[in-house]
Image (cartoon, helix red, strand yellow):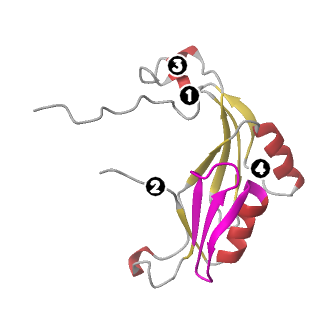
């Protein structure tokens, strides 16, 4: 399967309010807006997109309708400290305080109005113990995400 785009779509009971939250606090702007769906794009990176959909909309299969749960969204940024201070000043909850983790992240966790957890992270050097767990070429997460090597151009013969 060749994927041309990938982005999460959050189900909510308040499409406009949820979209406004991500616009105000995380630098998104709307590309499409209706009363039941909003498509957001980061003002800093056109590859970072987020959809917001009415959780009980007819396009959602009935057995899948509802609010988003069990989801953690990661925003990898250059300066989590500055974003932490801004989020704190805005009165948003801080569920995990700003800290350095031995697995190679400086981060904090907040949540959106629907209870979706938001982890704001910056890769940092991992401890030797965790560095040994990274795949060869992954570089310990230091060059953006996991910096994984590209897959082969075609599957191996056989």
Residue 96 lies within the magenta run: no
On the image, the x and y values in percent for residue 72 come to 58, 52
Q: Residues within 10 Å of mark 3 (few under 14, many from 20)?
A: some
Which label belongs to residue 131? 3
Q: Secondary structure at mark 2?
A: loop
Disc 3 versus disc 1: distance between alpha carbons? 9 Å
Is disc 3 placed on a helix, strand or loop? helix
Residue 42: give x, y in percent of width and height. 66, 55
In primary-sequence order, the first of circles 2 and 3 is 2
Identify which residue is drawn at 39% across, 77% down: 63
Residue lying at 80% horizontally and 57% vertically, measured from the top left? 92
Secondary element under disc 1, as helix, strand or loop, is helix
**Residue labelled with disc 1:** 141
The residue most toward the top is 128
Cα–Cα gap, marks 4 and 2: 31 Å
Judging by the rendered image, the residue that carries numbered circle 4 is 94
Earlier-in-chain disc, 4 versus 1: 4
Element class at badge 4: loop
Q: Nearer the viewer, residue 15 or 108?
A: 15
- Look at discs 2 and 3 and give the one toward the viewer: 2
Residue 84 lies, in percent from the top left, at 80, 44
Q: Which mark is residue 122?
A: none
Quadrant of the rendered structure where residue 125 is?
top right
- Could you classify mark 1 by the number of other residues whose Cα lies within 10 Å: few (under 14), some (14-19), or many (20 or more)? many
Which residue position holds label 2? Answer: 5
């Amino acid at each position: 399967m060749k994927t041309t785009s990938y982005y999460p779509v959050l189900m909510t009971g308040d499409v406009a309010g949820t979209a406004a939250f991500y616009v105000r606090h995380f630098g998104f702007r709307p590309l499409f807006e209706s009363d039941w769906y909003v498509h957001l794009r980061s003002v800093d990176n056109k590859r970072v997109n987020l959809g917001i959909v009415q959780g009980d909309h007819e396009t959602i299969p009935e057995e899948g309708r509802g609010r988003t749960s069990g989801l953690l969204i990661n925003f990898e940024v250059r300066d989590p400290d500055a974003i932490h201070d801004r989020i704190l000043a805005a009165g948003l909850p801080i569920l995990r305080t700003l800290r350095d983790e031995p697995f190679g992240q400086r981060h904090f966790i907040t949540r959106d109005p629907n209870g979706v957890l938001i982890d704001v992270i910056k890769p940092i050097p991992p401890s030797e113990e965790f560095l040994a767990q990274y795949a060869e070429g992954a570089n310990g997460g230091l060059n953006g995400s996991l910096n994984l090597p590209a897959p082969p151009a075609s599957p191996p013969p056989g």
